[in-house]
Amino acid sequence: MTESITNSSDWIKVTDFIKARFEKEPDVRGILFIIGLREMGFNKTKFTKEQKQDLMNLGACTVLSLSGYFRISSVDIEGWPSFEQILPIPAYSNADQETILMEHIIKYFKQQGLII
């Protein structure tokens, strides 16, 4: 399942967009990190390990919110959103989890007008 989405034209558009902007070959975790950065509006380049994990989690919750799995429940004083789970996330294999995230990343990039 993952291989078919990896070769899809929309996924290639996402990875080409990231490569052009950051000059790196992206993986799903890296793209979720970038989405987290974008959502927070961060411009800095140095982050602690915990901040990186928080940004990847923010990216994952953001893209999964597009299908109603999560919604923002509050925002703290520093601007970090807290998400609440609305729908149960089905138990997927690791490969299927990655595919679901990739599909939602594509949806996010399209919704944001970053790819057509």
Image: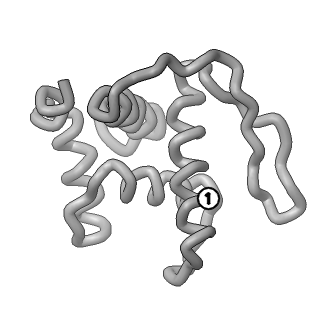
Amino acid type of disc 1?
A: Asp
SS at mark 1 in the image: helix
Residue 54 x, y percent position in the rendering? 61, 59
Which residue is painted at 10% across and 35% down in the image? Answer: 7
Q: Is residue 34 above or below residue 83?
A: below
Residue at the limit of the structure toward the bottom, as seen here:
46
Is residue 2 or residue 115 the one in the foreground? 2
- On the picture, is 19 further left or further right than 69? left
Residue 96: give x, y in percent of width and height: 31, 27
Q: Which residue is mark 1?
A: 54
Residue found farthest to the right: 77
Residue 21's spot in the image, x, y percent?
30, 66
Q: Quadrant of the N terminus?
A: top left
Can residue 110 be seen here? The reply is no
Q: Residues within 10 Å of mark 1 (few under 14, many from 20)?
A: some
Q: Residue at x 14, y 30 (%)?
A: 8
Tell me: residue 81, above or below residue 102: below
Which residue is at a point 41% across and 31% down the rendered structure image?
A: 104
Question: Who's the residue at 89% across and 61% down the image?
Answer: 77
* Between 74 and 94, the one nearer to me in the picture: 94
Question: Where, quadrant-wise, is the C terminus in this rendering?
Answer: top left
Tell me: residue 32, above or below residue 87.
below
Quadrant for residue 74, please give it: top right
Is 25 left, or right, of 88 in this rendering? left
* Residue 42 can be seen, yes or no: yes
Q: Count the marks.
A: 1
Residue sitting nearer the eye, 29 or 91: 91
Dividing the picture into quadrants, the one containing residue 40 is: bottom right
